[in-house]
Amino acid sequence: MRTYITLIVIIINTLIIGSIVALAGIFDRGGRVYDIGSRLWAWAIRLCAGIKVKIKGLEHLDKNKSYIFMSNHQSHLDAVAWATNLPFRIRFFAKKELTYVPIFGQAIYMSRHIIIDRKNIESAKKSIEKARDMIKKYGLSVLVFPEGTRSTTGGLGEFKKGGFVLALETGIPIVPMAVQGSFELLPPHTMKIRPGQIRLNVGKPISMSDYTMDTKQSLIDRVRNEIEKLVSQA
């Protein structure tokens, strides 16, 4: 019963808040309406689903700075957990296909998320270039799931490079993070949400001053190792 109620809330929430965000985006270029709406959307889901969140490591962050947050990805609940606990103006890397979803897709586009066409490398590069300017102009941070998709086993998958390229081009620090517990609450290939606790662990920012495009793989390896450590400590 809880799952059905949560799904109904998600649908109604998306229709109402998504419509407001999409329309407001015409005038609200910085996405302030989205910042409020996305948190309300995520909190409503958490409350209905019976999801509690425990977070540690926020003391490593400066609320007045922008970051590129990188987390492992266990389920759809990850974004909900981070959205309600990171005190930053967050945007996501989003697959182009998501923009085709009625209302939800328009809200994503109008709120300045980073739309990535994985089938078109040149288009993906242009999206990252556009994101670079947008982040600096509006003081945004970006949440990246470098695996690119949810884990089917609970373990870490292969990392995509887009988020690392963005970090290197902007000089914005990467913050490795970990989520634990969401895999069990919403396993793959099911819509049944179980109530329970999600544990979040935030690591220390990694400066881009020691890395270049030529040493990008070294940066990827470091971030992956940090996330693995944080997962074991979450």
Image (cartoon, rainbow, N blue to C red):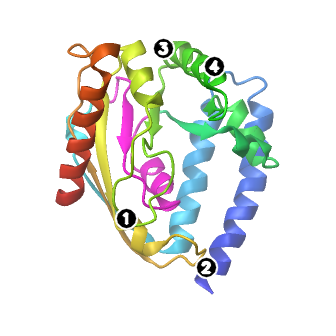
Image coordinates of residue 31 in percent, x first then y, are: 63, 29
In the shown orientation, is residue 147 left or right of residue 27? left
| Callout 1: SS | loop
At 47% from the left and 20% from the top, the residue drawn is: 139
Q: Mark 4 or mark 1, which is nearer the start of the sequence?
A: 4
Q: CA distance from mark 1 to mark 4?
A: 32 Å
Q: What residue type is disc 2 on?
A: Thr
The residue nearer to you, when weighing 158 against 82, is 158
Q: Mark 3 or mark 2, which is nearer the start of the sequence?
A: 2
Mark closer to the observer (4, 2): 4
Q: Circle 2 sits on which residue? A: 3
Image coordinates of residue 190 in percent, x first then y, are: 58, 75
Q: Mark 1 or mark 3, which is nearer the start of the sequence?
A: 3
Q: CA distance from mark 4 to mark 2?
A: 40 Å
The residue nearer to you, when weighing 99 against 140, is 99
Residue 227, magenta (yes or no): no
Q: Circle 4 sits on which residue? A: 122
Q: What residue type is disc 3 on?
A: Lys
Image coordinates of residue 148 in percent, x first then y, are: 50, 45
Q: Are marks 4 and 3 in contact (CB under 8 Å)?
A: no
Image quarter in which the C terminus is found: bottom left
Q: How many marks?
A: 4
Q: Mark 2 or mark 1, which is nearer the start of the sequence?
A: 2
| Callout 4: SS | helix
Q: Mark 3 or mark 4, which is nearer the start of the sequence?
A: 4
Q: What residue type is disc 1 on?
A: Gly
At 27% from the left and 19% from the top, the residue drawn is: 215
Q: CA distance from mark 3 to mark 1?
A: 34 Å
